Structure formats: structure tokens, C-alpha cells
Image: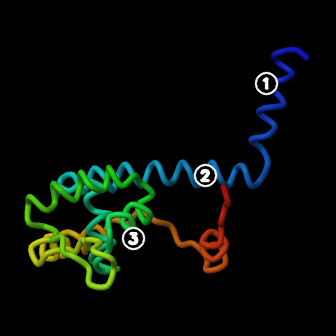
Amino acid sequence: MSKSKKRQEMYELLDFPKVKAWRTLMHAYSQIYRYLESELLKENCSISRFQIFFYLYFHGPMSSIELAQNLNVTRGNVSTFIRRLSEDSLVEINAAEGRGGKQLIEISNKGKMLFESFFPEHIKRVTAVMPEISSKSLKALSEIKVDF
């Protein structure tokens, strides 16, 4: 099989409707992520820092393992961020009662105030850039589960 024929076959794979949808989602994610990240950096907040604030603010105290799982990063990455946030008094680390001595990370009052200062503007930016997506499409996207 010639290289040009093989290449043509590869391009044809891109025409599958689900592949087009996936590529469109990845492109949109990339564009939105870069825009929101650049805006958060103006607030002196990285996306990683924002995500940690988000989970701790809306989901309450959690262990570094739980936080790493929610963020889909390693515990080492979380530990580095938590240490910095703790040094800035933006989170508190407390022993968890009844959890075998595990430590729970909690957003501090200072961290809450900081998060509350930029979160409403962040949501304005999100709503400005995001298109309307039907409930049916949102449900289908939220139900994607891949075992690996």
C-alpha cells in the first residue's frame, strides 16, 4: 500500500461523526482552558490553584489522596500545591477524627475570601465563552465512563 493511500485512509478516519465530535470537544477545551487560565493568572491564580480552591470550597475538607483523585493528578503534585497554599495561609491541614490519623485539607477563611473575590468574575467569563449545550448532550457527556 502506498504512503498516499495509507494517509488517505487515515484522513477518512477523521470523518467519523464521533471522531469529529471528539476533535471539536478537544479544540473547545483547549481554547477555553487557555483563555480562562490567562484570566486567572491576572488574578495571580493558576488553574491548579483554582481547582484546589474549587474542590475544597464546594466539597469541603478532603485528604490529599481524595484531592489528587478529583484533580486527576499525582499525590506529589497535590502535596506541592498544598504546601504552598498552607505557607500562604490559604488552606489548613488538620487531623481527621475517625479516619485513622489521616490529614484533611480545608480551605481557610483567608482562602475562602480570596476564592470568593475572583470566582464570580470567573463564572462571568465561563458563561460568556460557553455555548448553550442541550440537557440531552450534557447528560450523554456526563455519562461517559471508560475503564482502563
Q: Is residue 22 above or below residue 59?
A: above
Residue at 16% across, 76% down: 112
Q: What residue type is labelled 1?
A: Arg
**For mark 2, what is the residue?**
24
First in sequence: mark 2 vs mark 3: 2
**Is 68 placed left or right of 148 in the picture?**
left
**For mark 3, what is the residue?**
127
Judge the density around disc 2: few (<14), some (14-19), many (≥20) Cα neighbours within 10 Å.
Answer: few
Element type where label 1 sits in the image: helix
Residue lying furthest bottom: 98
Q: Which amino acid does label 3 sit on?
A: Thr
Residue at 61% across, 80% down: 135
Q: In this view, does 57 lie above or below 81?
A: below
Give the spatial CA distance, label 1 vs label 3.
Answer: 40 Å
Q: Tell me which corner region of the image, top left, top right, bottom left or bottom right, holds residue 11.
A: top right
Q: Tell me which corner region of the image, top left, top right, bottom left or bottom right, holds residue 4.
A: top right
Q: Do the residues labelled 1 and 2 touch (CB within 8 Å)?
A: no
Quarter of the image with the N terminus is top right
Foreground of the two, 79 or 115: 79
**For mark 1, what is the residue?**
7
Q: Position of residue 9 (x, y in %)?
A: 84, 31
Element type where label 3 sits in the image: helix
Q: Which amino acid does label 2 sit on?
A: Thr
Q: Is residue 3 above or below residue 145?
A: above
Judge the density around disc 1: few (<14), some (14-19), many (≥20) Cα neighbours within 10 Å.
Answer: few
Q: Where is residue 70 in the image (x, y as percent from the top left)?
A: 43, 66
**Is 20 placed left or right of 16 in the picture?**
left
Give the spatial CA distance, label 2 vs label 3.
Answer: 19 Å
Q: Where is residue 102 in the image (x, y as percent from the top left)?
A: 29, 72
Residue lying furthest top: 2
Residue at 28% across, 78% down: 61
First in sequence: mark 1 vs mark 3: 1
